[in-house]
Amino acid sequence: MLGLPRGGVAVAAEVAQALHLPLDVYVVRKLGVPARPELAMGALAGDGTYVLDEQMIGALGVGDAQVRRVIAREREEIRRRERAYRGVAAEPQLNGKTVLLVDDGLATGATMRVAAIAVRRSNPKGIVVAVPVGAKRTCESLLDVADRVVCPFQPEPFPAVGLFYEDFSQTTDEEVRRLLANCTA
């Protein structure tokens, strides 16, 4: 089981404990539009895999140099988080295993999409995306990169993931480290 930081690790920890599975982290980052960083124009995985929403980039007039700067900045943040969460421990071996990718929800699905694409390169037996809440269209769209998508709550309309949580406060790096340390099988 791989949780996408940071909120996805909190959700994954609950699932890992219930299913008695080992938990690790898979660090990915949203590529935010330069003038509106909360708006995803794509996403980046730790191995350098990225996805871009070319239509959005074009519509907003984001230039190639701006995209490259955002990718470079987020690549550094991925490295920092991998060191913070995993230290010197090796990444899990995924070859031949069924991998559960867990996040706290799916709005655009950019980070989950890039995670599934990157994980697929490790030759897993299968990839299951699991989230408690998500936009129906996004859940369906991920079936082209995952073998299965489990999302029990798909309300329409879907304004934002955080609206479906009583407490959607930011999960800290320290909380991620603690959750990972407590979830070993």
Image (cartoon, rainbow, N blue to C red):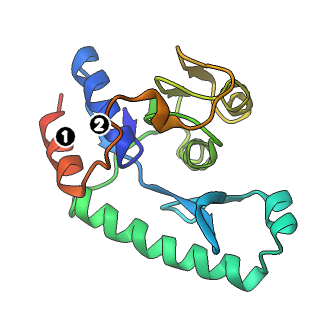
Q: Image point 63% across, 48% down: which residue?
A: 110
Horizontal arrangement in the rendering, residue 148 relative to residue 138 (left or right): left
Are discs 1 and 2 less than 8 Å apart at CB? yes
Q: Secondary structure at mark 1?
A: helix
Vertical order, 30 against 144 (above or below):
below
Q: Tell me which amino acid carries mark 2.
A: Ala
Residue 150 image position (x, y, % from top left): 54, 19
Q: Tell me which amino acid carries mark 1.
A: Leu
User: Which residue position is annotated with label 1?
Assistant: 179
Q: Residues within 10 Å of mark 1 (few under 14, many from 20)?
A: many
Q: Quadrant of the N terminus?
A: top left
Please tell me which residue lies in front, 11 or 146: 11
Q: Quadrant of the C terminus?
A: top left
Residue 181 image position (x, y, % from top left): 14, 43
Residue at the far bottom in the pictured view: 65
Please tell me which residue lies in front, 26 or 174: 174
Residue 86 sits in quarter: bottom left
Residue 48 image position (x, y, % from top left): 57, 66
Q: Image point 61% across, 38% down: which residue?
A: 107
Vertical order, 22 against 66 (above or below):
above
User: Which residue position is annotated with label 2?
Assistant: 10
Q: Image point 77% across, 75% down: which residue?
A: 62
Q: Mark 1 or mark 2, which has the lower sequence index? A: 2
